[in-house]
Image (spheres, coloured by chain):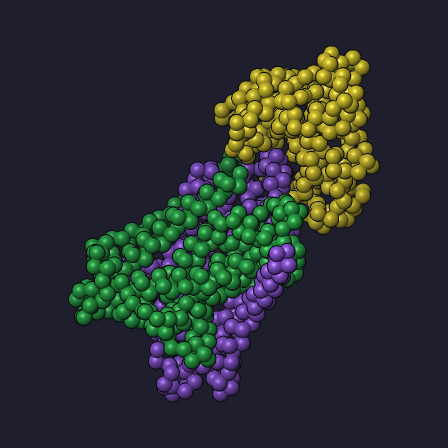
Chain colours: A yellow, B purple, C green
Amino acid sequence: MEQTGQPHNVSIENLDVFIEANHILKNINLTIPEKSITCIIGPSGCGKSTLLRTLNRMHDETPEVRISGKVTVDGQNIYAPRVDVINVRKKMGLLAQRPCPLPMSVFDNVAYGLRIHGMRNRKDINQRVVQYLQYVGLWDEIQGRVKSSAARLSVGQQQRLCLARGLAIEPEYILGDEATSSLDPISTKKIEELFLKLKEKYTIILVTHTLRQARRIADYLIFMYMGEIVEAAPAEQFFNNPRCQLTVDYLSGSFS
Amino acid sequence: MKQFRIIINKFVRQTMLGIAVLSLLLLVVIGLTLLVKALPVIKEHSLWALLTDSSWKPFKGDFGFLPFVLSTLHVSIIAIIIALPVSLLTAIYLNTFASKTIRHFFEPAIDLLSGIPPVIYGVWGTLTIVPFIADTLAPHFVDYSSGYSVLAGGITLSVMIIPLLISVLIELFRSVPDEIIHASLSLGATKWQTVKKVILRKSFPGIIAAVVLAVSRAFGETIAVLMVCGNMAIIPKSIFDACYPLPALIANNYGEMLSMPNYESALMLGALLLFMIIVFFNGISRLTLYHIEKRFQM
Amino acid sequence: MRLDLKKKEERFFIVLMIISALLIMSFLGFILGTILYKGLPALNLDMITKLPGGGFYLGKEGGVLNAIAGSLMITVGSVIISAVFSVPLVMYINFYLRKGSFFSNAIRFSFDILFGVPSIVYGAFGFALMVYLGLKASLLGGIISVSLLIMPVMMRSFDEVAKLLPHNLPEALLSLGSTKYEMIKVLLRQLMPALITAVLLSVGRGIGDAATVLFTSGYTDNIPTALGQPAATLPLSIFFQLGSPVEEVQNRAYASAVILTVIILVLSFISRYFSAKYSKNKI
C-alpha cells in the first residue's frame, strides 16, 4: 500500500441521500478517526446502513438513489467525477449483514479478490490466502477443506471467510454492516475479537444492531435518528455523559 | 340458501379436480395416441432401421428417417450457434448494464419478436435470407445453391429462438441473489468481472437448460423451416444444400398420405419422435430451472 | 496497468453487448420493414372485405376475408375452450391446493412441457383424434387442435400472476365466512387484467399458427357457417398464396402477411396496456 502524506481518515460534509422521493440521510457532517472502531447505532430505519454504503459507493448499483455532498477518504472526495469506483471499493472492505460466500470453494473465495485485482502468480495467491485464513482463525478449523464449497461452512465460519476475503485485498478501511447479526454468540465473540485486533492496522466503521456490542468494542459512537446524526462522541463520553436527551432515552431503552 | 352455497362449492371443487387430473393426463394421451398410430410402421420395419435408413420412398414402402433427423439437427445446431452468443450478451446487458429506460424500450421489442407468427418469419426468410444466400454468400463457397438451404433454415430459426433464450436467461440472471453480486462488487470487481466469474458461473446449469429449451423449440418449428429449407429428402452435404427437417416432412405430406399403406403411420412416427425428444429435453431443462429457482429462494 | 486491462475488457464486452442488443432490435425492424415494404403496395380494401373471387388464385380480383373470418372463428372458439379449462385449473392449483404441493407442481411441470410441444405435433394429434371421432377437416377440428395449442400459453401466463397474489387476500375472504367458490369469484375479479393479458397472448399464438390447422381445419374460399365445414386461416392463406407462381398472388401473400402482422401488433399493444395497468394497480 502506498502511504501518502494525506490525512488518513474519512470525513463527510453536507451529505444528503435520497431514495426516489424519500430523504434518507439529511445533511450529515462527520469525521471518523483513524485506527479505531467507530460504531454507528440507532433504531432500525434511521439510515445507518445507508450511511455505511455511501462510503464504498455501493449505492451506485441502485439507480433510485441520489446522493449529494462530499465524502472525503484520505483527502480525496470519492464522489468527485472521474473517481474510480473500483479503487474506492478496494480501499473500503465491506462485511455484509449476512455472510455471503461466492459460489466457489473456500480457497477461491479468498483468491477471488486477489485475482480480480490482477494477481496471477499461484504462489503469491496461495501464500496470501493461507495468511488471511490463518488470520481469521479459519485455517486451523477447516484444515484440508479449503477446496470444498464455501457453502458447507457454518454461518459463523462463512462470516469469517468473508472477512478474510475482504482483508486479502488489503483494504485500508473495514466497513461492517451489522456483521454479527446473523451469528451465534460464540461466532460473534470471535468476530469482535478480530475487530479489536484489526483496529491496530485499519480504521473500522461498524453499523451495529446491539448497544451491548457497541459498549464492548467501540472507541467512538455515532447515534442516528430519522436520517440525522444526533450525537457523535468518544465511547466513554457517549455512554457516561451523553449530551442529548434523545441519546439518554435511547441508551435507557425507552425506544429502539 | 346456505345448503345451496355449500353444494355449489363442492361441485366447483370436484369439477376443478377433474380438470386438473385430465390436464395431467393430456401429455400421456398425446403420446399414446401418436404411438398407436405409429405402431404399424414400427412393427414392419423396426425402429432402429427406420431411424438409420436414409432412403425415403413412400411409394416403395421405404421410410428412412435419417435425412430428416439429420436435417433437423443441422438446422437447430446452426440456429443455436447464431442465437446463443447474441442472446447471452443481450440478456447480460439488459440484466446488468442497461438503464431502466433502455430496458423498458427493449422488453416490448423482444416480446413482439416472440409474438411474430412463424409464417411471417417464413415470408421474411424467403424474401431476404434465401436470396442473400443464393446470390451473395453461397457463390463464394459452392458452385450453386438455390438459397433454400440448411443455412437459411438455421438463420431464420435463430431469430425465432432469440426471444425465448433471452427471456429465460434474464429470468435466470435475475434469480442470482443481489447479495452475492454486491459481495463481489464490494471487493472492487468490475461489473463484467462479476458477470463472468459469479453470475455466469452460478447460472451455468441454467444456461445449459435454456439452450436445451431453445434447441427443442427449434426442433419443432414447422412452417418457417418448411418455407426456407428447400425440402429435399437427402442428407445435406453442406450448409448450402437443401434439407428437409422432420416437422416440414409431416406438414408437407399430410394431404397425400392416405392412399399409401403405412405412409400415415410413418408420418405419425415422425410426430411421435418429435414429441418424445421434445418432452424429454423440455422435462430435463425445466426440472433444472425449477431446481435453480428453488435454491435461490431462501 | 492491470487495472487498465480489466477496465478495457469490461468496455470491450459492453460494446459487444450493445451491438448484440442493437442487432436484435434491427432484426425486428428488418422483419417488420420487409413485410410492410413488400405487402403495403398490394394491400387494399378488397383484401379485407372480399372473398376470393373466381380466378383469384390466378391473380384476379377478390380478397382474403375467408381467411380472416376463419382465423377469427377458430381463435375465438379455441380461446373460449381453453379458458374454460385453464381458468379453473389455475384457480385450483393456486387457491385450493397447498402452496408447493406435489400435485400443483406436477401440473405446472406438465404444462411447461406442453408449452414446448410443437404445433405440428398438436396438429398431428388433433388429426388422429378427428379420425378417431369420424370428423372431417373442419372448423371444429381446427378449434379443438388450436385450443390444445394455446391452453399451455394461457395457463402459464395466467398462473404466473395468480401465483404472486398476496396470500392475505384469500385468507381475509375466507375469514369473512365465504366459501372457497365465493372467494374464487372475488379473486377472479382481482386477477381480471392478468386473465385478459393471458387471453391476448394466446389469441396471438392461436391466430398466427399454421402447423396446427394445416390438416385439422381444411381450407375453403367461403366463410364457414357451421362447425362441420372447413375453414380457411390467415397463416395458411399466406403460405398457399406464396407457393403460387403468379406474381399477383404472391403479392397478395405479402399483403396478407401485413394484415396478420398488424393484428399481432395491435394485440401486443393492447396486452402491454393491460399489463402496465395491472402493475400500477399492484403498487
Q: Residue furthest front?
A: B1
Question: Can residue B79 be seen in the rendering of this structure?
Answer: no
| Residue B30, image x, y percentages | 51, 72
| Residue C99, image x, y percentages | 65, 54
| Residue A3, image x, y percentages | 64, 22
Is residue B37 shown left or right of residue C102? left
The vertical placement of C38 against A167, above or below, is below
State which quadrant residue B266 falls in: bottom left
Q: Which of these two is toward me, C34 or A118?
A: C34
| Residue C100, image x, y percentages | 65, 55
Question: Can residue C92 be seen in the rendering of this structure?
Answer: yes
Q: Residue furthest right?
A: A186
Q: Which of these two is toward me, A248 or B201?
A: A248
Is residue C243 shown left or right of residue A205? left
Residue at position x 59%, y 66% in the image? B18
Q: Residue furthest left?
A: C60
Q: Which of these two is toward me, A143 or A80?
A: A80
The vertical placement of B52 against A20, above or below, is below
State which quadrant residue A237 falls in: top right
Residue at position x 73%, y 26% in the image? A256
Residue at position x 63%, y 54% in the image? C179
Quadrant in the picture for the N terminus of chain B: bottom right
Is residue B222 shown left or right of residue B97? left
Instruction: Report the number of discs.
Output: 0
Residue at position x 48%, y 60% in the image? C83
